[in-house]
């Protein structure tokens, strides 16, 4: 496994909620990335964002790890939840909050802070 | 042109689809909304339903034809 791949995997495994997106939460560069972020915010998720734009290799390595071809990608406790459409649909049905509660515990909204981490 | 290609790939992957549409959202041939209703989705998680659509569109996703893809799946009995 490459160093980059290991770093991506570490974010997926270590962060409660990992969002791989184009741009940053402060400046999203893609409508779908923004849609996923906003759905996660509505559900009160503690989002850790990773900008995939600085290096095309990030997206390649990420898709190789996840088996998911498009960006954004949302992981909760190391498990792929899906892209923007899925996260939005799950948020609307209330299932996203249930997933967050099941995997992160009932207090998942506490200590909610949005952060951005770098992998390159 | 790309719209027809996507439509053909999805029709091939979901021959039973009761609803299948490809919409060019921006008129630029690279931002698409696809909707598929198929019995193949029954009992699958949303993640696996979208995975089947992504697999059907693997080639245009990989070669950059699709810049942005929105997916709506419906499981039918």
Image (spheres, helix red, strand yellow):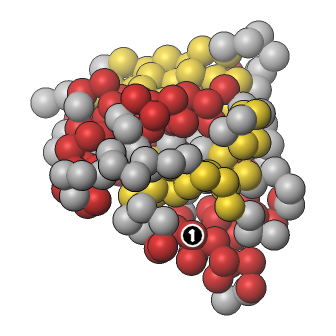
Left or right of residue A104: residue B60: right
User: Which of the 4 image quarters holds residue A32?
Assistant: top right
Above or below for A17 versus A12:
above
State the image coordinates of residue A58 (x, y, percent, origin top left): 75, 64
State the image coordinates of residue A8 (x, y, percent, origin top left): 63, 71
Above or below for B38 versus A83:
above
Mark 1 — residue?
A: A11
Specify the quadrant that holds the N terminus of chain A.
bottom right
Which residue is at the front of the view, B70 or A35?
Answer: A35
Circle 1 chain: A
Left or right of residue B60: residue A53: right
Left or right of residue A27: residue A15: left
Residue found farthest to the top:
B27
State the image coordinates of residue B48 (x, y, percent, origin top left): 35, 50
Residue found farthest to the bottom:
A1
Which residue is at the front of the view, B29 or A5?
Answer: A5
């Amino acid at each position: 496994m490459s160093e980059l791949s290991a770093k991506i995997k570490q974010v997926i495994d270590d962060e409660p909620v990992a969002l791989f997106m184009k741009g940053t939460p402060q400046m999203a560069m893609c409508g779908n990335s923004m849609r996923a972020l906003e759905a996660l915010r509505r559900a009160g998720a503690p989002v850790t964002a990773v900008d995939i734009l600085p290096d095309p290799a990030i997206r390649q390595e990420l898709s190789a790890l996840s088996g998911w071809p498009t960006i954004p990608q949302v992981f909760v406790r190391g498990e792929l939840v899906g892209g923007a459409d899925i996260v939005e649909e799950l948020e609307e049905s209330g299932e996203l909050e249930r997933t967050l509660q099941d995997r992160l515990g009932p207090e998942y909204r506490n200590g909610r802070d949005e952060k951005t981490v770098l992998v390159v | 042109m790309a719209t027809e290609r996507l439509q053909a790939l999805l029709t091939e992957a979901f021959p039973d689809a009761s609803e299948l549409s490809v919409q060019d959202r921006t008129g630029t041939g690279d931002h698409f909304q696809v909707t598929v209703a198929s019995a193949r989705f029954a009992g699958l998680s949303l993640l696996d339903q979208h995975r089947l659509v992504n697999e059907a569109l693997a080639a245009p996703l990989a070669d950059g034809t699709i810049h942005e893809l929105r997916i709506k799946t419906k499981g039918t009995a």
